[in-house]
Amino acid sequence: MAAVAEKAIASDEQLLHRKSPPPPAALAEETDRDYKRDVKRLVDLLSKLNPFAKEFVPSSHASAAADGHGKSDSQLSADAPIFVASSDYYYNYGPISNSGSRNDSSSDGSSNNQPNRRRRNGSSQGKKRLNNRLRGAKREDSIKRTVYVSDIDRFVTEEKLAEIFSTFGTVVDCRICGDTNSNLRFAFIEFYNEDGARAALNLGGTVLGYYPVRVLPSKTAILPVNPEFLPRSENEKEMVVRTVYCTNIDKKVTETDVKSFFEQLCGEISRMRFLGDSVHSTCIAFVEFVWAESAIVALSCSGRILGDLPVRVSPSKTPVRPHPARTASN
């Protein structure tokens, strides 16, 4: 019992000697002192940072300064607040660029530095559609200014036909085509304006050569010829009168065969250009005769079998120019 009493007395003495809690005023003073110490450490830490460091300067500000459009002396305060957008902001709106758009790349609507192929393709397709509409409108206008003339005697030349129709207006182009089923031919005549084409319809029934011609509004336009191939001088115009244009020539037929074919039926040939390639199934040829009468006779050969195909013959719009002389290399 004495031992138990001694232990109880000892524990009471320890409780008496234990330090009592500080008063509230002292506790508040200590908390304030700790706060000031932490703030001083933070200020010391921030004072050692470089305000021009990359992480403190926005990308837009850096690019503007690099281009010379921004203020190079502009600084971002070290204690400036940091704003961080939430993930749903970028999902719904996207970052706003310098131009005011919400693209995160170039101003053409691309993203992630990838070109906007859809927009580029759409632009090119729009231009293509516009060009097609312009060509279509131009073609429709050309049709309105063109007349179709049929039952033309094979001895009537394009020059003579254009001269007759020019009494009703300015003739822009005249194209006579051979008919494979008849000695008679047909032509397309394009005028400068619609008034000339309407007036030319009055020539229907006029006898040209031995037959009366029929004149109707055309349903097609004349296929334009490359101006570089048209006659450039009076001498070349005379060459065109003696030249015919041949198409649908069998590929098994050689240039010698074509020359022999026309010389036997029409007359002497002065120059010929025979053309063919691996893309087209037939060949073409420009045949220039010595005499204009031979070219007229050659038009009647349209439809004759040359090889295994009927050859088509029509007046040529271009002369057969000689190949340029090759200069000897040193």
Image (cartoon, rainbow, N blue to C red):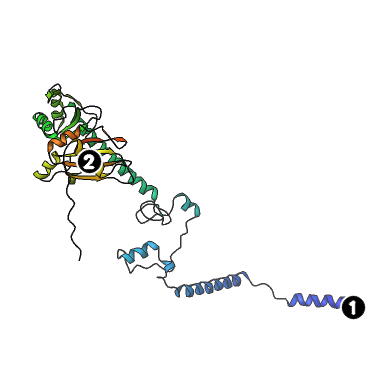
Q: Secondary structure at mark 2?
A: helix
Of 183 and 58, which appears nearest the observer? 183
Q: Position of residue 236 (x, y in %)?
A: 12, 44
Residue at numbered disc 2: 260
Residue at numbered disc 1: 2
Residue furthest out toward the top = 205
User: As displayed, is residue 164 above or below residue 131?
Assistant: above
> Label 1 amino acid?
Ala
Q: Quadrant of residue 156?
A: top left
> Label 2 amino acid?
Ser
For the residue carrying disc 2, how many other residues have a C-alpha within 10 Å: few (<14), some (14-19), or many (20+)?
A: some
Look at 15% across and 26% down and name the residue there.
198
Look at 28% across and 44% down and name the residue there.
254
The N terminus, quarter of image: bottom right
User: As displayed, is residue 176 above or below residue 226?
Assistant: above
Q: Quadrant of residue 220?
A: top left
Q: Position of residue 107 (x, y in %)?
A: 36, 53
Look at 87% across and 75% down and name the residue there.
4
